[in-house]
Image (cartoon, rainbow, N blue to C red):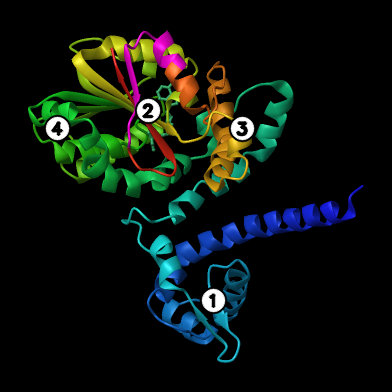
Amino acid sequence: MDKERAQGFMQKVIGDVGTAMSAALVLVGERTGLFRTMAGAGPLSAEELARRGGVHPRYAQEWLGAMTCAGYVEYDAASDRFTLPDEHAIYLTDPQSEAWLLGLFSGLPSIMAVIPTLADAFRSGAGVPFTDFGESLPVALEQMNRPVYENRLVRSWLPAMPAVVERLQAGGRAIDVGCGTGVIPLVLARAFPNARIEGLDLDARSIAIARAYAEQEGLQDRVRFVNASADALDREPGYDLITTFDVVHDLPDPLGVLKRIRGALADGGTYLMVEPKVDDLLEKNRDVPFARLLFAMSCLHCVPQSLAQGGTGLGACWGPARARELAAEAGFSHFAVLQVRSPAMAFYELKA
Ligand SMILES: C[S@@+](CC[C@H](N)C(=O)[O-])C[C@H]1O[C@@H](n2cnc3c(N)ncnc32)[C@H](O)[C@@H]1O
């Protein structure tokens, strides 16, 4: 027994528990608006934060202590004041910004709540259906991705496929499969007023929310949301663009759906498959923070909900080599990894 190694591991585990506990308080900071109150305000005492943020001073004091130990907030002992540095605030305060990271915390309560069911599923091999993750999961998933989708899809990602942009400008047809609450179809509808846009998802609640968003924006006549399984994808009259964002690994039959997507493309149409960005080799993912997040999410949510649909549970962390193989198996003649900068997402362009 290497005592130093054992000690080091103990410290790591305690740090991990501290991180998990702090995550709950980060969510409290988000819901109470305390990060926003601190942003740009300079050094504040706990009383000042409590007053400005409209929270009880005792909670403000304890929260600031926890956020200081978690490394989110800086503390100056001489003045007994706390600062949220600008370099932290950019990630914590503006839900419209693509830098916003607090959305990543949104799914934690739903996922934590499913632990007893998941532990039983580990033993039985059963799945955990999407709906068992609770009513709030569709919007939590949306919050994880919305700012990046809204800021990047039209500005950076589609320009990597100029022919797609031309077709949509000219009034083409696009569908986002596994659209969740409809962020991608709505962004497309806003950007391409002549195009016919659809979103499809198996989860009825997600589709109901997507339809409500479309109505709020007055886009209900331009975007059609369908509550159906991906294997119900229409073959006619052919789509110029089919997208899946963070979906293929969740499907019960990824190969079958890829074949269907191939069959549903118009002549010269493009399938954009966006999947979590991981290395093909587990050993290369080991010390990568994003990979740690993605592997955990895969085991907690992606695999169990795929198994619940009678699927194989591909898992979110399947890497580009297997994506290329699956594309070839589904009969796609073209597969390219798009040179799009993203720390978390891999962009695959497929053509029939
Ligand atoms: C991780 S979420 C991604 C949602 C959205 N595309 C995004 O990027 O935020 C996966 C989505 O796939 C949907 N899904 C899972 N299995 C499906 C199936 N068999 N057919 C259609 N949609 C499915 C889920 O309901 C969920 O909305």
Image position of 71 with respect to 202: above or below? below
Query: Reading the chain from its start, which is encountered first: label 4 or label 2?
Result: 2
Q: How far, Cα to Cα, is label 2 from label 3?
A: 27 Å
Q: How far, Cα to Cα, is label 1 from label 2?
A: 41 Å
Query: Reading the chain from its start, which is encountered first: label 4 or label 3?
Result: 4
> Bounds of the magenta span?
325-339
Kind of residue at badge 1: Glu
Disc 2 is placed on an element classified as loop
Q: Residue 172 in the image: state x and y as whole percent.
A: 13, 24
Q: Which residue is mark 2?
A: 178
Q: Which residue is mark 4?
A: 221
Kind of residue at badge 2: Gly
Q: How far, Cα to Cα, is label 3 from label 1?
A: 35 Å
* Front in this rendered view, residue 175 or 215: 175
Kind of residue at badge 3: Leu
Disc ID at residue 282: 3
* Front in this rendered view, residue 158 or 41: 158
Q: Which residue is mark 1?
A: 74
Q: Residue at 45%, 56% (x, y): give it.
A: 102
Query: Reading the chain from its start, which is encountered first: label 2 or label 3?
Result: 2
Q: Is residue 114 left or right of residue 203?
A: right
- Residue at the far bottom: name it: 78
Query: Reading the chain from its start, which is encountered first: label 1 or label 4?
Result: 1
